[in-house]
Image (cartoon, rainbow, N blue to C red):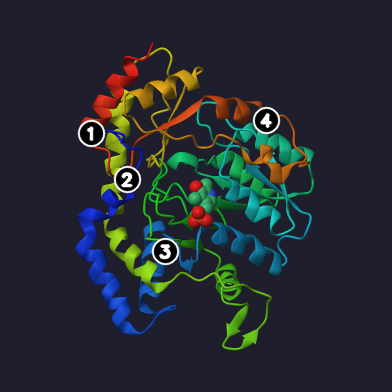
Amino acid sequence: MKKYPFLDLAATTAPIRDELVAAATSVIDSGVYIGGDQCAAFEKRLAELCGVPHCVSTSNGLDALRLIFKSLMALGKLRPGDCVMVPANTYIASFLAITDNDLVPVPVDVDPRTMNMDWDKALDAAEANAHIKALLVVHLYGRIAWNDRACRKLTENGVIIVEDNAQAIGAVTADGRMTGSLGHAAAFSFYPTKNIGALGDAGAVTTGDAELASMVRTMANYGADRRYHNIQCGANCRMDPIQAAMLNVKLNYIEQENDRRRRLARVYLDNIKNAAVDLPLPGEGDMVWHQFVIETPERDRFTAWLDANGVGWDIHYATPPHLQPCYRGLEHGTLKVTEQLAQRIVSLPIGASTTERDAMEISRIINDFK
Ligand SMILES: *Cc1c(COP(=O)(O)O)cnc(C)c1O
């Protein structure tokens, strides 16, 4: 048993157990098990949080991403075979949403400091390839991956920008804009380990585009714009009201949870002092530290040291999507930074079960690594 678990999900729910039980009970007693008030309330609140007019709740984050691309295609804004830029350092879901829609992912290498999209490389790629019609920007680790100058230029050239905001709910740019409101549309995941997690799978789409929001809602509901009237070959990708009820409770604590993560990150940043360990940048805008990712050239020895001292750890992600067996044969340029990061990164505990005192102790253990 680890003294400092990487993440203990039961510890995340325990402090609000009574509220969650009451919310679940109200759904059980309501007789409404698809859609209804809980889903509508959640959509309204998430839209308000992000400062966007529209939100559609979905079954999970991957479906949220898939629905955005599927809807853009149904609206004629993207066509099969169009290329979509995506950072090479991301979770596989970012790629799957693209390939699932017969679009072609163009992986772009990341900036070694932010571990997020390298904007110069994105601009170069867009210039070199006229088939690039969209960009999926991923705010990985809760760090805002947005560059106004580059995004303006891409938008002016007709590139549609979609945000994968699975890891950065509640993050605010330096000039006060929320992730989820920056691009044409954004996908959220409420997978249990995210900063705000359901007690199962859940996701959402936010957008300022009313037509897109309506198409996403249609696509997520069998392609029906009204009952038994199917204008699209859609799917069943709705959020369960019982998960919406859980999330309506959890949303009350988003600021508290993100602040807790910021304080833990601060403890690590201030206290880890070891030449064998590179710390992440302190943050651009108000990042929300979905993961606290350090780098070390001696990862095997380092993780063995963490194991020996009871410190949980994880790797996000050990194999980038373009090196996964399912993407054998995918064309891409050199992705050296991503591939090197994959060999060096380690995520430290930052979830609800970790206290500031734990983070102090973990820092001390890391400082003793030789
Ligand atoms: C979690 C995650 C997803 C997928 O969300 P699910 O709800 O698990 O389908 C997509 N992109 C990123 C970056 C994620 O971290």
Q: Nearer the viewer, residue 135 or 275?
A: 275
Q: How far apart are marks 4 and 2 (CA)?
A: 34 Å
Q: Distance between the residues labelled 2 and 3?
A: 29 Å
Q: What element carries label 4?
A: loop
Q: Is residue 22 left or right of residue 39?
A: left
| Among the two numbered marks 2 and 3 on one chain, the one whose residue lies closer to the N terminus | 2
Percent x, y of residue 70: 66, 64
Kind of residue at disc 2 = Asp
Q: Is residue 174 left or right of residue 77?
A: left
Q: Is residue 15 left or right of residue 246?
A: left
In this rendering, the answer to whether 242 lies above or below 272 is: below
Q: Which residue: 29% across, 48% down?
A: 257
Q: Nearer the viewer, residue 212 or 110?
A: 110
In this rendering, the answer to whether 229 lies above or below 73 is: below
Kind of residue at disc 3 = Ala
The answer, for residue 219, to whether it is visible in the render is yes
* Foreground: disc 2 or disc 3: 2
Q: How far apart are marks 3 and 1 (CA)?
A: 32 Å
* Foreground: disc 4 or disc 2: 2
Kind of residue at disc 4 = Leu
Report crowding for label 3: few under 14, some 14 to 19, many 20 or more residues within 10 A (C-alpha): many
- For disc 1, the marked residue is 356
Q: How many labels does the image show?
A: 4
| Among the two numbered marks 4 and 1 on one chain, the one whose residue lies closer to the N terminus | 4
* Foreground: disc 1 or disc 2: 2
- For disc 3, the marked residue is 47
Q: Is residue 144 left or right of residue 224?
A: left
Percent x, y of residue 118: 60, 33
Q: Which residue: 63% across, 77% down?
A: 223
The answer, for residue 75, to whether it is visible in the render is no
